[in-house]
């Protein structure tokens, strides 16, 4: 995959990333209040908490500008599914996983199966359908929410390295986007390009220990 294609992906997702970085801390706060009202500690009911965050995020996104990205209003259970032209994205809680797997669900496995974003530098690869994952992770003590964009090429067996050809953090604003640059990842398990910050740190997720 070439750097130009990776930068195009980053620019295309930038408006959605800006919006998600704005509303996700609010969704987290709302979800925490719901859990408190129900006397349900987050550490005992992590799945319900993740559902509450997703529901709150869906509600907030209905009145948030996401530019050309559209939130699918028909998604069952208020799942966070987005589309823009031929590209679609699904938002998932990462929890303790590095990258959530497709499991055995046929529809989900099909969504995880994508052609390479750039095949020997061919620009046509960016003009076909692609499905992306947007994963979120939280640090409850600070209210921080980490967002990552991941492009998978095929499902993988549980315990095996994720099959991805692009992975990057979703920047919170234009300034944050401008400070990021592309370089090959330091992780040999990843075949594609990762997005690293100005300090040279490959972004693979900072909050795994406190993940919910």
Image: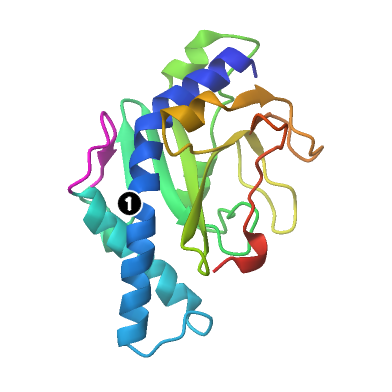
- Name the residue nearer the viewer: 3 or 102: 3
Residue 65 shown in magenta:
yes
The residue drawn where x is 25% and y is 49% is: 61
As drawn, the residue found furthest toward the right would be 188
Say if 68 sits above or below 25 in the image. Answer: above
Magenta-tinted stretch: 63-72
Say if 29 sits above or below 110 in the image. Answer: below
Question: Which quadrant: the C terminus?
Answer: bottom right
Q: Give the structural element (helix, strand or loop) at label 1.
A: helix
Residue 28 shown in magenta:
no
Is residue 89 left or right of 3 when viewed as pictured?
A: left
Query: Which percent across, then down, holds residue 102?
Result: 55, 53
Is residue 110 left or right of 40 when viewed as pictured?
A: right
The residue drawn where x is 75% and y is 52% is: 160
- How packed mark 1 is, by other alpha carbons closer than 10 Å (few <14, some 14-19, many 20 or more), is some
Is residue 125 left or right of 67 when viewed as pictured?
A: right
Say if 59 sits above or below 51 in the image. Answer: above
Query: Which percent across, then down, holds residue 172?
Result: 44, 39
- Name the residue nearer the viewer: 133 or 38: 38
- Name the residue nearer the viewer: 195 or 104: 195
Q: Would you identify the image quadrant in which residue 153 lies?
A: top right
Magenta highlight: main SS: loop
Query: Which percent across, then down, holds residue 86?
Result: 35, 26
The residue drawn where x is 63% and y is 50% is: 205
Which residue carries the number 1 mark?
23
Q: Would you identify the image quadrant in which residue 209 lies?
A: bottom right
Is residue 73 left or right of 41 when viewed as pictured?
A: left
Question: Which quadrant: the N terminus?
Answer: top right
């Amino acid at each position: 995959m070439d750097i130009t294609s990776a930068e195009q992906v980053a620019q295309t997702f930038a408006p959605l990333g800006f919006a998600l970085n704005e509303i996700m801390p609010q969704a987290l706060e709302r979800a925490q209040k719901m859990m408190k009202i129900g006397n349900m500690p987050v550490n005992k009911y992590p799945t319900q908490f993740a559902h509450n965050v997703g529901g709150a995020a869906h509600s907030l996104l209905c009145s948030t500008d996401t530019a050309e990205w559209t939130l699918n209003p028909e998604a069952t259970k208020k799942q966070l599914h987005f589309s823009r032209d031929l590209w679609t994205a699904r938002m998932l809680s990462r929890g303790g996983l590095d990258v959530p797997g497709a499991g055995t669900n046929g529809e989900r496995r099909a969504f995880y199966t994508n052609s390479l974003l750039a095949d020997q530098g061919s620009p046509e690869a960016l003009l076909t359908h692609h499905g992306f994952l947007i994963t979120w992770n939280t640090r409850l003590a600070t209210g921080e929410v980490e967002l990552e964009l991941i492009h998978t090429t095929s499902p993988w067996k549980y315990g095996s390295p994720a099959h991805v050809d692009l992975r990057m953090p979703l920047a919170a604003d234009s300034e944050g986007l401008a400070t990021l640059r592309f370089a090959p990842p330091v992780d040999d398990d990843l075949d594609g390009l990762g997005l690293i910050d100005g300090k040279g740190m490959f972004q693979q997720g900072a909050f795994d220990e406190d993940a919910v």
